[in-house]
Image (cartoon, rainbow, N blue to C red):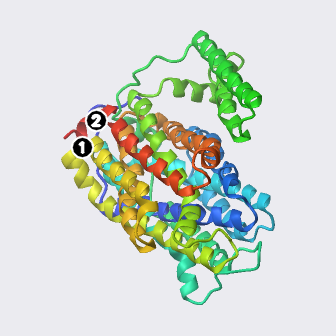
Amino acid sequence: MASNPSARKPQLSFWQIWNMCFGFLGIQFGFALQNANVSRIFQTLGAEMDSLPGLWIAAPLTGLVVQPIIGYLSDRTWTGLGRRRPYFLVGAVLSSIALLFMPDSPTLWIAAGLLWVLDASINISMEPFRAFVGDQLPVSQRAKGYAMQSFFIGIGSVIASMLPWMLEKWGVANTADAGQVPDTVRYAFYAGAGVLLGAITWTVLRTREYPPDALHAYDEAAPLDRAPLQLARATRFGLLWLGIGALGLALVALQGLPRELYLLGALLAAYGIALLALNVVGPDNGFAQVMTDIYAMPTAMRRLAIVQFFSWFALFAMWIYTTAAVTSVYYGSTDTASAAYNTGANWVGVLFAAYNGFAALAAIAIPAMASRLGLRMSHLVNVSLGGLGLASLPFMPNEDWLLLSMAGVGFAWASILSLPYALLSDSVPARKMGVYMGIFNFFIVIPQLVAVATLGYLLKHLFADDPSKILVLGGASMVVAGLCVLRVPEPAAHAA
């Protein structure tokens, strides 16, 4: 059904927006437990510090595959539960199961496999949640909707990140035999399974969705501004990217570079192969349609890709190496069985809770900031504060001062989770909201894969095994992201 220019999507009340975003509390509860504790679990099970990025590879690779598929499918789904909500519920059930089993992993590789399952399952729920806001809200309310998601992300993350620390205060054992995950972490994961499932179920039961005809009638996006991908052009690009990827793989092999760098060459080659595959699948095939949508993505998305790359490279560096940096710099220990290391690791949980708490407060202020400064300038200010906060982590007088660093990171986190999506959603047609939100998440996943491929090498060969320098690099990357956002078109509804 064609859009009706005279039709305007109704504005939703505060409590309607609250209910549609509440499930994100559960999603982020699971993510926060993962981000704050998975490196700790890996190190407890015997992982060396420079191998941590490789073990984290499950998370970004899963998102790269799952999110566009789920987005494509959810655009074409309509059931008794609606368009997006069936995916919320399936992802919640699978995520809860993974959370229950991960802290009891008997070996390192089982833990890495469960991270893969957990991340895939969370992505099944999370990607449609992003499209859900675009579906339900008019352009003028989308910054508010994404900021509400950021608020729940902050609240969920505060509680989840602090759980091991709080459980220790309540008398739960925070140390265990070598190779065993402490009870503080295990019980936190068990609680997370229940919170994740409960919060998403609330949103599933307390919201409704527009039927497809109504949704398309409300479509406010301009037509896509790039011609569809033709087969001849796809073939040329495919051969080019395949050649570049193959050359990269050969250089890694011939120069004896770290095996993680094979990942970059393989990604480039895989993209080339995917373009070449368009010659053997029909134009109506789902794979062909997703590849065509990638090529025809709006200008705003192409420019936001660069912003997202530098933002998420910084965040992934923080999630992987903050525990190692804080425990070594401020607690003087790298021994995962020691009381000092585990005390420091719990403090990292508190720090992660702090930046999420600051993010929840920032999310309240972001709609007013965006109204006054515009989306782009607001994002520049917020991620610059985050870059300064992240870079300052190794240089504070003591571990208590790290809370100040986390204030800057919190403002950046709230902004990264809201304003790029508000900048994007105005340019995406309603009928493709899911698939384009999935494709947009490529630009979250790809920098994480680059981080996986390069951070271990940089740590060993450039930073002398000092993880705190990785955090400084992440801070610089976040400031670059802020500068790049100035190239993104400002939606008319939010222009300052």
Q: Residue at x 22, y 54 (%)?
A: 368
Displayed quadrant of residue 16:
bottom left
As drawn, which residue projects farthest toward the top?
A: 232
The crowding category of the residue bearing disc 2, from other C-alpha atoms within 10 Å (few below 14, some 14 to 19, many at least 20), is many
Please tell me which residue lies in front, 338 or 433.
Answer: 338
The crowding category of the residue bearing disc 1, from other C-alpha atoms within 10 Å (few below 14, some 14 to 19, many at least 20), is many
Displayed quadrant of residue 248:
top right
Earlier in the chain: of badge 2 and badge 1, it is 1
Residue 374, disc: 1
Tag 2, which secondary structure?
loop
Q: Mark 2 sits on what residue?
A: 490
Pointer 2 with pointer 1, Cβ within 8 A: yes
How many numbered callouts? 2
Position of residue 158 measured from the top left corner of the image (x, y, whole percent): 46, 70
Horizontal side of residue 184 vs 413, given as left or right: right
Q: Residue at x 34, y 38 (%)?
A: 483
Please tell me which residue lies in front, 289 or 235.
Answer: 235
Position of residue 302 measured from the top left corner of the image (x, y, whole percent): 44, 30
Q: Residue at x 57, y 69 (%)?
A: 327
Residue 292, disc: none
Position of residue 165 measured from the top left corner of the image (x, y, whole percent): 54, 79
Position of residue 437 measured from the top left corner of the image (x, y, whole percent): 49, 41
Residue 148 seen in render = no
Q: Quadrant of the N terminus?
A: top left
Tag 1: residue type?
Gly
Please tell me which residue lies in front, 241 or 274.
Answer: 241
For marks 2 and 1, give the CA distance.
Answer: 7 Å
